[in-house]
Image: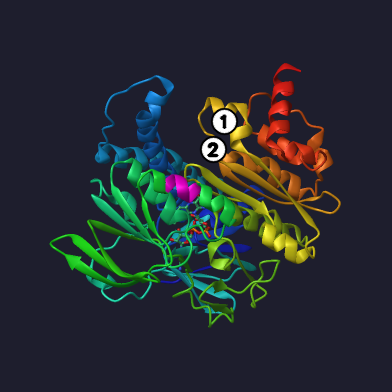
Amino acid sequence: MTTRLTPDICVIGGGSGGLSVAAAAAAFGVEVVLIEKGKMGGDCLNYGCVPSKAMIAAGKHAHAIAEAPQFGVSAGEVKVDFRKVHNHVHSVIGAIGPNDSVERFRAMGVNVIEAAAHFTDKSTVLAGDTEIRARRFVIATGSSAFVPPIPGLDTVDYLTNETLFERTRAPKHLIVIGGGPIGMEMAQAHRRLGAEVTVIEGFKALGKDDPELAAIVLDNIRAEGVAILEGSKVTLVEKRGKTGVRVHYESDSGAGQIDGSDLLVAAGRLANVEGLGLDKAGIEHDRRGIKVGANLRSSNSRVYAIGDVAGGLQFTHVAGYHAGLVVQQILFRAPARENRDIIPWATYTDPELAHVGLTEEEAAKRHGGRISVLRWPYAENDRAQSERKTRGLIKMVVDRKARILGVSIAGAGAGEMINMWALAITNGMKLKDVRGYVPPYPTMAEIGKRAAITYYAPMTRKPFVRWLVRFLRRFG
Ligand SMILES: Cc1cc2nc3c(=O)[nH]c(=O)nc-3n(C[C@H](O)[C@H](O)[C@H](O)COP(=O)(O)OP(=O)(O)OC[C@H]3O[C@@H](n4cnc5c(N)ncnc54)[C@H](O)[C@@H]3O)c2cc1C
């Protein structure tokens, strides 16, 4: 028998974006239905950010042991028990999971339905045997790994982000198709945990980031022993023996093949629009996702789309930001528009790579070339020297009035350091706002202030003057 519900809001998808909308609506006493067909918490908790960062943390510990002799400390040979790494990853998911659980959301007053949802017309969604006619719908169905149509790929047991973290044995030789943030993070983590790793990338690895900074990260990952083949297109995948794979590729320098024990496909993401009945609901969409305006409304004015399915930047903090914008419009009837220029992102390789605002290229285009680019290397920072984390650079782009347009950082703690610059850019701050603040010594955050000061004192861009500034700062 069909149950009929008429809540204020119906959210489809219980991941980063959907949970935030549902929690906010419930907190304001608004009647809300949340529909989730898989695991609450979505990709981020179960197959994305959380397990990947937990695995990176395991790799970091292994690497720290290997590096310890440089500090006069020795912990012996690095030994990795991959089953225990798996247990660590899943215990982290388990620790965070209760925050996103069905029980917690029901206790908040959210009506959680565990089923797949689809539209049957412009204002009705069906989930199992429940029919929902809501005042507003929010689609937050996320994205899935894009599996390219490579001949032979369907004949092997390839891994994606949904299966990678289930492994209890270390791969002997992991081949990764795709050198984006997910591919590079997992390549380095597995290398540090003892696997041989080859990354095959069709264009440039970490190609969405500033090439000068991406090069710093890629050089380090290569130095740790990961083979990164750029400009190489995979042409064929074959089974090799019982469980192995052979990957054929072509590049400008000719064709080649690599044998591996495991294959990870990390070749981009596809928005989850299939099976949602979007055409029946008059919701325009394409391969990239649901088409939305800056207010995140779809072509059906009753329906919003947020997070990965909205076809823009695909990060958990973006899904959370979108949720806030949608809540503002639905609950308070206040206009809200997405501003992509203030959204930071970070790749959690070692060194980390982070960015916010305009890249040098974008800024030059928008400001007709009237920009200044400021830099400061990690090697000129005392804390970075003490920690032996000297590989890195901050790069800052400012306009003619010294307004900060964009900041990119490659180096230790870049994902943390970018926070301050995200705040600066969100608030339209200028370099003079940074000039006056006092960072504690010795911190790596000083690197940002040093870069800012070079704007006023171009002489400090010279190595000797940089040395003098550091000397005076320490003893002056
Ligand atoms: C390996 C990896 C690492 C990542 N690391 C980071 C990181 O470090 N930082 C970061 O910011 N981002 C990271 N991301 C991206 C991040 O996971 C996503 O941007 C984020 O999860 C998107 O949130 P969402 O709400 O749009 O979708 P999701 O969190 O994926 O939630 C979508 C939910 O909708 C459900 N659903 C789909 N269709 C239906 C349907 N028809 N009916 C009912 N339910 C449905 C799904 O089951 C899923 O639970 C990573 C992603 C991956 C794959």
Front in this rendered view, residue 336 or 348: 348
Give the numbered dot on residue 384.
Answer: 1
Q: CA distance from mark 1 to mark 2?
A: 8 Å
Q: Amino acid at mark 1?
A: Ala
| Residue shown at the point (53%, 39%) measured from the top left | 391
The reply to whether callout 1 and callout 2 are in contact (CB within 8 Å) is yes
The picture places residue 417, in percent across and down from the top left corner, at 63, 39
Disc 2 residue type (three-letter): Ala
Q: Nearer the viewer, residue 342 or 413?
A: 413
State which quarter of the image contains the N terminus.
bottom left
Indicate the secondary structure of the residue bearing disc 2.
loop
Give the structural element (helix, strand or loop) at label 1. helix
Q: Is residue 9 left or right of residue 431?
A: left
| Region in magenta | 217-221
Q: Is residue 439 visible?
A: no
- Image x and y of residue 32, in percent: 58, 58
The residue lying at 55 percent from left, 75 percent from top is 124
